[in-house]
Amino acid sequence: MDFKSLAAQYRDELLHCVMPFWTDKSQDLEYGGYFSCLDRDGTVYDTDKFMWLQGRQLWMYSMLCNKVERRQKWLDCAVQGAEFLKRHGHDENYDWYFSLTREGRPLVQPYNIFSHIFVAMGFAQLAVATGNDEYAEIARRTFERVVQKRHNPKCRWNKAVPGTRDTKGFSLPMILCNMALEIEPLIDKELLDSTIEECLDEVMNVFYREDLGLVVENVTADGRLEDTFEGRLMNPGHALEAMWFIMDLGVRLGRRELVDKAVRIALRTAEYGWDRKYGGIFYFMDRLGKPLHQLEWDQKLWWVHMEAVVCMLKGYSLTGSQECLQWFEKLHNYTWDHFKDKEFPEWYGYLNRRGEVLLPLKGGKWKGCFHIPRGLYQCWQILEQCDKL
């Protein structure tokens, strides 16, 4: 495999296609922040601003300044987004709204803890890029709110009746594994270490089920499986994304057994989630093979495939697994063949089961400047390392 050429392919797509698209099309130079609802050619089709996408884009620009090059344009984009968020994005408790109007008026209450998480990650990276203590303090205070809210993330906006069917979801401990490393320089070491260990235990010993060899999306409050819609739900993309977070933590902590276990889970997940008829990875599955209530269950989504590409490439680079390398090649081919728009910049987000474009948009309420550019960056870096071996 020509790692050098592949590294250049990912680098050039990131620096000359995807990031220029978001820089040129998504900046709101009148009110601040970022437009995420962009049509195929980058035309803005809705001006509402969603906090977790704002935080993700802030993180993306700041990370590139810190890890690739201190470009003034990237820094300017990051700072203007941060200032909009600082002024309008939160209440007096540093609870971050789910969405705002273009001008910055709150639209949806701060029920979603992922708004907090991605905003904290964005401000943490910008604090590193600028040395600005105010940005660092925003990241710290937001992380404190995440820790306070994590056992009841939606607080008073939780619709479930307490005590009937109390459950917990995989997505929160999964993303906290990644968030912990992002804000490491800014928070107390004891708090960081305890958060990492708690989340590692949840991901690898509670949501990972040894009898299945797979990660489940929901368990009861005391860690059991249930035969319900939520209890049977599987999301292969979540598991694959989480496994490369775990690999990073394994490296950070010097725990090779974590890396090896994450690779085993990733390989099993890819095999389980792959659509043998049309190719690609299913969005949702049912662990008992029963019907799903998510009508989009068989769609092929951008983030699932990009995270799977990163996961397999990282698994190969850390362990030399030929199975990971084979899966990387298979996923790379599918992803570039189906999601990359050959005419306009940026990538499609939503395909039907057959791999045909379902929605031509480049951004919306859920898709923004994050999974594609982050994945391109990760693969570029890993492939350059592979080329040097």
Image (cartoon, helix red, strand yellow):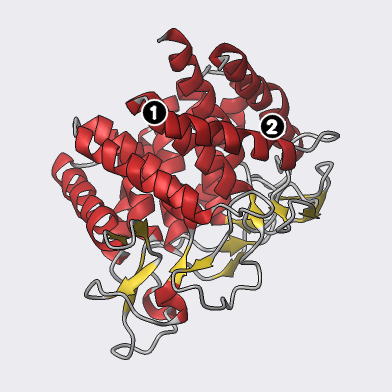
201 and 289: which is toward the camera? 289
Cα–Cα gap, marks 1 and 2? 24 Å
Q: Residue at x 62, y 63 (%)?
A: 105
Q: Are discs 1 and 2 less than 8 Å apart at CB?
A: no
Seen as rendered, the residue at the extreme top is 388
Task: Please say whether residue 332 is visible from this viewpoint.
Answer: yes
Q: Nearer the viewer, residue 229 or 286?
A: 286
User: Mark 2 — residue?
Assistant: 18
Query: In which quadrant is the N terminus drawn?
Result: top right
What secondary structure is found at the residue carrying circle 2? helix
Q: Secondary structure at mark 1?
A: helix
Residue type at mark 1: give it. Answer: Val
Say which residue appears at 45% left-offset and 63% top-offset: 91
Give the amino acid type for the residue marked by disc 2 in the picture: Val
Badge 1 or badge 2: first in the primary sequence: 2
Task: Please name the residue that numbered disc 1 is placed on.
Answer: 128
Residue most extreme to the left: 190
Q: Is residue 381 left or right of residue 360?
A: left
**25 shown above or below 379:** below
Q: Position of residue 354 (x, y in %)?
A: 74, 55
- Residue 78 visible in the displayed image: no
Q: Position of residue 38 (x, y in %)?
A: 76, 48
Quadrant location, the C terminus: top left
The label nearer to you, 1 versus 2, is 2
